[in-house]
Amino acid sequence: MKKRIVAIVFLIIVVILIAVTAMTPGTIADPETYQCGAYATILSLLPPVIAIVLALITKEVYSSLFAGIVVGALLYANFNLELMVNTMFYSGNGLVFKIADSWNAGIIIFLIMLGILVALMNKAGGSAAFGAWASKRIKSRVGAQLATLVLGVLIFVDDYFNCLTVGSVMRPVTDRHKVSRAKLAYVIDATAAPVCIIAPISSWAAAVTSSVPEDSGINGFSVFLQTIPFNLYALLTIVMMIVLIVSKTDYGPMKKHELNALKGDLFTTPDRPYDESDDGTENSRAHVLDLILPIIVLIAACILCMVYTGGFFGGEPFISAFANCDASMGLVLGGFIAIMFTFVYYMLRNIISFKDMTDCIPEGFKAMIAPVLILAFAWTLSGMTNLLGADVFVAGVVAGSAQALLGFLPVIIFLIAAGLAFATGTSWGTFGILIPIVIGVFPEGQMMVISIAACLAGAVCGDHCSPISDTTIMASAGAHCNHINHVSTQIPYAVTVLVVSAIGYAIMGVMFAVGAAGAAIVGLPISIVILFVVLMFMKKKAGKVEVAAE
């Protein structure tokens, strides 16, 4: 009966849309002057909200993202079916154009290259050898998680690179110590964007620098360095991870995943992403260097290629070259060098046949189909949101509230940035929109730095929570974790840090507005104390995972 009702409702909607299509033109006469009815209104945020809510309810990410894309295209087309289809696929923000975009295509190719590299290391026995080596030195679940955290902090160059590399290296170790894939995905995700946004030498530093208007007379890189101590969300996320791991505390859905992992089920849900290739091949001739050397070459090659694209070898200073680099191109070049090195190295070691190595190429491609599909849909959904003028709507809200509530501007900026990044799945786009507005309100001084830091922190926070964020998708892929499992277990942790960070920014803003001494330095210490108290309360309420499992 329910299926019939749904079918009838769907049929009625289609009939209405066909009638609207018949009465309205299906093409845009002048794209520069065309404007849909929902442009720059609250409805512009409807497509990502629909996609996110459906994903969390249905636990199915592909259809949820596609539904958001359809709704966005319908709103942009003013409910004309013909224009909707053209918008979805062939507009400048459509699926075909998003995949064809050179930057996006580079990220897809880099994903595939990493899939091939992982397949090679598994086939040669490098992953299994590293897992056996690490298990002799890492004796506990706490040690396995802390090692993952440390590696994530060390790979601060780029969040995509971080997610996939840390997952490939540490997955065998965390599996041996019965750490759930959801917990692994959280640690990976929490050491990706939150670390990159406070690392001076990273693709994120370059993005922030380029977001500062050239005509403002402000040195973007200098401002970025000044924001690091005030980026509460990033710093508190790192503190929270350490406290949770050391105190063996988990709460919310994560606790269920961790308890199940201790019983031998690393996934909790029936879905077993990449399960067939998790353990790697046992090879008596394999050595731990068979995994470590390709990873080291990958890291070094990516860094060198990124600064190469920024003109380092043409005379530019290293920092300037990194700030001006093309991260997508650099990662592709670095990935190619790493694969070529691995091919030659394994042939010289004679631990894998040439045929087995070539077989890893389609294997690596197939392993990355899921994240590539999710990324393509997420990029398109973001494109639909841009067509609807969500950035214009949010910019208007910020500009309208800034002058009236100057003392609360940091927390307002933080919350709006978090909401925009959550809805659109992009951090870079968020601070690209909001930083010029902040500078317009505060052209100079400490309040400008605090407010920009709040913008960056909010963008990372929203990105961290969002199911349609590319970084979140990459973390799921790196951990070989069901994407919705990763999102649902991570959100309670991210929201905890969000609330504490908001309190910290409110304290800093109000103290600065009333001229209180020490306004610039009290935010972080007070926030750390509040976070510690909250986590100790959660520990008392939830208890240690190991104890609960006994």
Image (cartoon, rainbow, N blue to C red):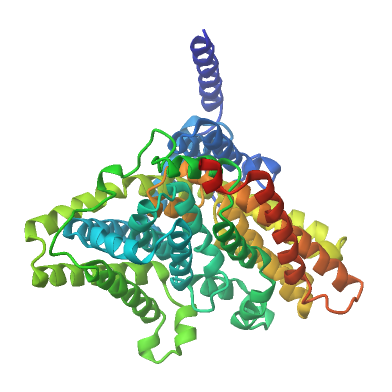
Residue 91 visible? The answer is no
- Count all numbered tags in the image, as a single digit: 0
Q: Is residue 472 above or below residue 299?
A: above
Q: Residue at x 55, y 32 (%)?
A: 57
Q: Is residue 475 above or below residue 520?
A: above
Q: Which residue lies furthest to the right in this view?
A: 514
Q: Is residue 69 left or right of residue 304?
A: right
Q: Residue furthest front?
A: 550
Q: Is residue 304 left or right of residue 340?
A: right
Q: Residue at x 36, y 81 (%)?
A: 308
Q: In this view, does 65 lie above or below 431?
A: above
Q: Which residue lies furthest to the bottom in this view?
A: 315
Residue 230 picture location, percent across and down: 69, 72
Q: Is residue 137 left or right of residue 377?
A: left
Please tell me which residue lies in front, 21 or 199. 199
Asked which quadrant contains residue 255, the reply is: top right
Residue 42 picture location, percent across and down: 70, 43
Residue 483 picture location, percent across and down: 45, 44
Q: Is residue 246 left or right of residue 443?
A: left
Residue 480 visible? The answer is yes
Q: Which residue is drawn at 53% across and 59% down?
A: 190
Please tell me which residue lies in front, 545 or 433. 545
Residue 501 picture location, percent across and down: 71, 61
